Each structure stands twice: as C-alpha cells, then as structure tokens.
Image (tube, rainbow, N blue to C red):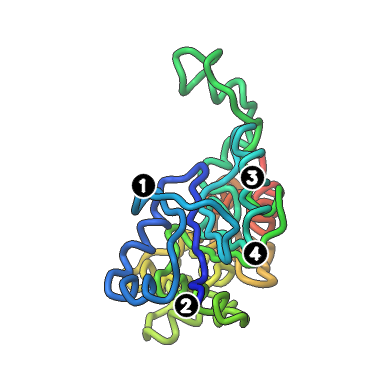
Amino acid sequence: MRHRPRLAVWKFASCDGCQLSLLDCEDELLALTEAIEIAHFTEATQASLPGPYDLSLVEGSITTPVDAERILEVRRQSKCLVTIGACASAGGIQALRNFAGIEDVVATVYPTPSYIRTLATSTPIAAHVPVDFELRGCPINKAQLLEVIAAFLAGRKPAVSSYSVCIECKRRGNVCVMIQGIPCLGPTTHAGCGAICPAYRRGCYGCFGPMESANTTALAREWQARGASSLQVNRALRSFNAAAEAFQTEALRHER
C-alpha cells in the first residue's frame, strides 16, 4: 500500500484565520485529503498522530517560553516546515508590543500581571528554527496555500508570485489610488490579496507583508512629499507585519 504523505498543522499565537483559510478550501480540501494524511490539525479534528511529518504548516508567532520550546519539537518532527500568515512570518499584529516595555503592556491588559508568563517580544518562527518557505498574508490566500502544499508534496518550488500589489491593481484595471492622493503601501507590499482595498479606493494596508526588495524608504519619501507626517508613515508601517524587516526598519526612521 502506497504511503500517503503526512500533513500537520500547528497553532501558536494567532487568531486562527490562516487555519480557517485551509478549511475554506472546501471542495479542494476533499481532494487533498485523498492525497495526504492529516496527522495533526486541532482546528479540524481531535485526532492527532505522532510524527514524523512530511509537511508542517505553522500558524502564529512565538510569544511564550513554552512555545519557544514547542516549536523546536515541531521542527524536529517535520521534514518540511512552512509558515502561514503574518504572525508566523513576521510576528503579527501582536509584534506591536516589541516597540514598548512588556511590563507596561501586560499591566495594561491583565488585572493580575503576576499570572502571565510571556516573552518580551513576539517573533516569527524563522527567528527560532529553520523555515523552508514563508507564505504571507493576513489571512493567507487559499489558492496560494494549496499551491504551496502541492509543491512541497511534489518536491518542487512553490509558484507563488513575489511582485507587489501594484501588479494586481494593473490586472484588475484599478486606477492608482496614490495618484488620487490616497496613501498606499501597495508598491512595497507582497501580492496575494487581489488588490481588494485599492479596488474600493482605499490604500493598501500591507496585509501580505513586504515584497522582495521593498523600497519602503522611497515610498515614505513620496508620502511625505504629498503631505504625510512622520507619525502617519510610522503608524502605516506598524500594523499586521510590523516586525517584517523592511517595514520595521523604515518605521524606526520615523519614530518620535
């Protein structure tokens, strides 16, 4: 009997949105389960089989000492490890705490801070273990997710675009919102959303993180030439992918 590759899906600090993207695949998921064995996926089933696993999908950032240890075991049990979403790939929205004192953050959120055991920062999976591929998005694009799974099971490189949201705007026939005076992160943001926000005359919020060789400095300079303040630039870059290097570095230049 032919061995079906084993897939495991793991959750760390996150909202579960990227795991739900896999469940949203619906008909495609039925075909997927015929080709693979889902060995661990708490969002979908209570059944959990021991490793090793051919492919692990990891959602969420590392924010606690326990998770910092758990990700090491996940990596040890996984032939290939793919991070899915902004939290796993760039620390997520919770990485905003990286720019403040953790004691102040905990005291503001929890009535009894002494009960909390947390790390000072929220960090991506790649800061702790080797990662074979990072699938970006908040949440991820389910078509891209299926492509990544198929690619790793076939032993090939995933065919996921590396260009910016601007290309998606052109394909949709969107009029550029930047020339309409609307600040937009699209020129530096990884494609994958289908340019949803610009299609409705809203600037891109950077949900898919920085594209390859993102020139955030040039974009910030253009925003400021159009009247944006340093505070506005800083806040725009500190959202879903605040800890992504290209966004974080430029945001620091506009720190007050």
Position of residue 50 measured from the top left corner of the image (x, y, whole percent):
53, 51
Tell which of 39 and 239 is nearer to you. Answer: 39
For marks 3 and 2 on the same chain, the one whose residue lies earlier in the sequence: 2
Q: Residue, x 58% and y 42% (percent of image)?
A: 95
Mark 4 surroundings: few (<14), some (14-19) or many (≥20) residues within 10 A: some
Residue type highlighted by circle 4: Lys
Q: CA distance from mark 4 to mark 1?
A: 23 Å
Q: CA distance from mark 2 to mark 4?
A: 21 Å
Q: CA distance from mark 3 to mark 1?
A: 28 Å
Q: CA distance from mark 3 to mark 2?
A: 42 Å
Q: CA distance from mark 4 to mark 3?
A: 22 Å
For marks 2 and 4 on the same chain, the one whose residue lies earlier in the sequence: 2
The residue at the far front in this view is 1
Q: Residue, x 44% and y 85% (percent of image)?
A: 170
Mark 3 surroundings: few (<14), some (14-19) or many (≥20) residues within 10 A: many
Position of residue 43 measured from the top left corner of the image (x, y, whole percent):
37, 50
Residue of label 4: 79
Q: CA distance from mark 1 to mark 2?
A: 26 Å
Q: Quadrant for residue 199, please give it.
A: bottom left
**Does residue 163 appear in this view?**
no
Residue type highlighted by circle 3: Thr
Q: Secondary structure at mark 4?
A: strand
Mark 2 surroundings: few (<14), some (14-19) or many (≥20) residues within 10 A: few
Residue type highlighted by circle 1: Gln
**Does residue 32 appear in this view?**
yes
Residue of label 2: 1
Q: Which mark is residue 123?
A: 3
Q: Which mark is residue 46?
A: 1
Residue 5 located left or right of residue 73: left
Residue type highlighted by circle 2: Met
Position of residue 196 measured from the top left corner of the image (x, y, whole percent):
36, 70
Q: Secondary structure at mark 3?
A: loop
